[in-house]
Image (cartoon, coloured by chain):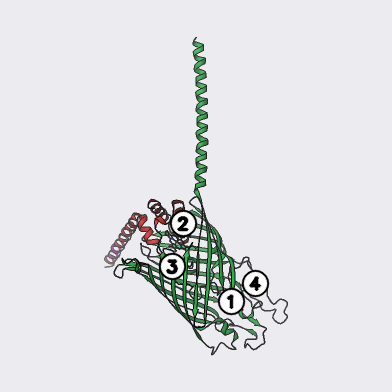
Chain colours: A green, B red
């Protein structure tokens, strides 16, 4: 009898442990499934972007422009990994351009340290990285010298970046250091009028050395209303070998030691003031590019003065200041969506180069915001100086005719 | 005479140091006390108009604020508080 009871207890014991383990197993597998489900939820995909369409009208020309249609893909994995890419579709000057604006992956390594790899927007100054999308930019075009059209500054490039924000007492530091493929020096063999210019967007490099750069932004006040940033960028843009290797006359010319040093200061102040019932937004950036002296060759003998060998001081600079006011605090529903904006910008390209140009521009705008990222922009713009195309036809850089162009602009920009 | 001067210098240094410490601790406090609402209103207006919490859903906010944390170099604490505010107010 006793033995029977012991046997039964033994069996009960075994079966309960068995049942327990199987329940435990089931629980474990359910837990596993939940956590994988969580992981699936943890990744998220978004399609966003922006577009701008409008019209430029001057005294002798009226034209529609689709200045941008840029879809942006965002993919987040967990809370630390983000992939972003932008496709740029631009229709300008009878040309349709499709390009990869940027495509990169960011990983939050630690508090205040993010590593970014791929094609990045180069954090040189702030306009290119933070203010260029058409629904962010309060005017319908970029300030002089900061657009895609003129190759004075780096916009996007392939490389590695480390960046982050650090709290320093009441103030904040925003930093970024990076290394990218860097620019190429145009040696004039493809287009002699561009000798000495830099070309920034290269899918592969023409030499071993990479460009390096950094931006440090200081936000002295605890409410982050003010930011002052300093940027520096250094590159050796020349090819390792002479482009004139097969030319017995010029084979001694080499650009391998040419250095490019770029610097910028940027300023941003955004604050609501009750006495004027609205938001003041001031943005400014000054950029300087200094490329060391080199000898260029112009084989063209059709009348330009600079035939044969020549050199020039290869320094360029560009500046802009923009002030905007929006009466966000007034009660009137229409007025609170109206924004007034004024911008001055100028640039100076090197005197003595075949691409010399010097312009200044005043832009005024009145915007109406339908939503936080859909805006109708009305603008009037006066640009004067020597446009690039004029100096190319001119025999000397002296006495070049300056001209003034006034245009009226209506644009609709939206975040998608 | 020399001694007295030295003492004054020391006292001034100590006062400055105390002031510095005090400033740092109050700074820490001020920053730590900031709410998500406050950080949202101060930071998200710096580059573009400010979106409101109802403009996007929770998973969208998670992605957007990560995007902005990287773009605007927000600190991890700022980003965390802003995401929480967005998610709790939409």
Question: Is residue A349 toward the left or the right of residue A376 in the image?
Answer: right
- Which is nearer the N-term, disc 1 or disc 3? 1
Residue A149 in the image: state x and y as whole percent. Answer: 55, 74
SS category of the residue bearing label 1: loop
Magenta residues, dominant SS class: helix
Span colored in magenta: B6-13
Contact (CB < 8 A) between labels 2 and 3?
no
Residue A131 in the image: state x and y as whole percent. Answer: 46, 67
Q: Nearer the viewer, mark 4 or mark 1?
A: 1
- Which is nearer the N-term, disc 4 or disc 1? 1
Query: The N terminus of chain B lies in which quarter of the figure?
Result: bottom left
The residue most toward the bottom is A399
Marks 2 and 3, how far apart at CA: 21 Å
Q: Chain of mark 3?
A: A
Residue highlighted by disc 1: A197
Answer yes or no: are tags 2 and 1 on the same subunit: no
Q: Nearer the viewer, mark 2 or mark 3?
A: 3
Marks 4 and 3, how far apart at CA: 45 Å
Q: Chain of mark 2?
A: B
């Amino acid at each position: 009898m006793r033995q029977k009871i012991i046997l039964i207890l033994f069996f009960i014991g075994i079966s309960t442990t068995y049942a327990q383990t199987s329940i435990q197993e089931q629980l474990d597998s359910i837990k596993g499934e939940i956590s994988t489900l969580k992981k699936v939820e943890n990744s998220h995909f978004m399609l966003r972007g922006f577009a701008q369409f409008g019209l430029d009208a001057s005294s002798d020309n009226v034209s529609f422009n689709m200045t941008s249609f840029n879809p942006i893909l965002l993919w987040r994995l967990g809370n630390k990994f983000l992939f972003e890419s932008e496709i740029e579709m631009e229709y300008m000057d009878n040309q349709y351009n499709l390009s990869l604006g940027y495509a990169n992956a960011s990983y939050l390594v630690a508090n205040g340290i993010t590593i970014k790899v791929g094609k990045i927007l180069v954090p040189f100054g702030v306009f290119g990285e933070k203010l260029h999308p058409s629904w962010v930019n309060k005017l319908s075009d970029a300030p002089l010298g900061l657009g895609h059209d003129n190759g004075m500054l780096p916009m996007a490039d392939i490389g590695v970046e480390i960046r982050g924000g650090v709290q320093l007492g009441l103030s904040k530091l925003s930093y970024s250091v990076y290394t990218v493929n860097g620019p190429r020096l145009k040696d004039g063999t493809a287009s002699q009028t561009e000798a000495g210019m830099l070309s920034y967007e290269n899918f592969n490099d023409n030499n071993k050395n990479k460009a390096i750069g950094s931006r440090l932004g200081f936000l002295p006040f605890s409410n982050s209303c003010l930011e002052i940033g300093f940027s520096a960028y250094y590159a050796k843009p020349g090819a390792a070998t002479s482009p004139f290797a097969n030319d017995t006359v010029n084979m001694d010319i080499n650009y391998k030691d040419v250095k490019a040093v770029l610097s910028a200061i940027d300023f941003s102040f955004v604050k609501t003031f009750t006495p004027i019932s609205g938001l003041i937004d001031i943005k400014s950036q000054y950029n300087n590019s200094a490329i060391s002296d080199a000898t260029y060759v112009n084989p063209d003998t059709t009348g330009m003065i600079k035939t044969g060998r020549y050199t020039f001081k290869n320094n360029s600079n560009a500046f802009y200041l923009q002030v905007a006011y929006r009466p966000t605090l007034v009660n009137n529903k229409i007025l609170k969506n109206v924004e007034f904006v004024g911008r001055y910008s100028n640039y100076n390209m090197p005197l003595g180069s075949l691409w010399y140009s010097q312009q200044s521009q005043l832009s005024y705008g009145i915007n109406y915001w339908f939503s936080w990222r859909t805006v109708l922009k009305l603008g009037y713009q006066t640009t004067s100086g020597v446009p690039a195309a004029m100096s190319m036809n001119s025999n000397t850089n002296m006495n070049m005719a300056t001209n003034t162009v006034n245009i009226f602009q209506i644009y609709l920009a939206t975040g998608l | 005479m020399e001694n007295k001067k030295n003492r004054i210098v020391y006292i001034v240094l100590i006062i400055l140091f105390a002031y510095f410490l005090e400033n740092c601790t109050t700074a820490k406090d001020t920053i730590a006390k900031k709410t998500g609402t406050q950080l949202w209103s101060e930071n998200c207006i710096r580059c573009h108009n400010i979106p409101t919490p109802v403009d996007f859903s929770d998973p969208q906010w998670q992605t957007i604020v990560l995007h902005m944390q990287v773009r605007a170099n927000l600190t991890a604490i700022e980003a965390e508080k802003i995401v929480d505010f967005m998610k709790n107010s939409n």
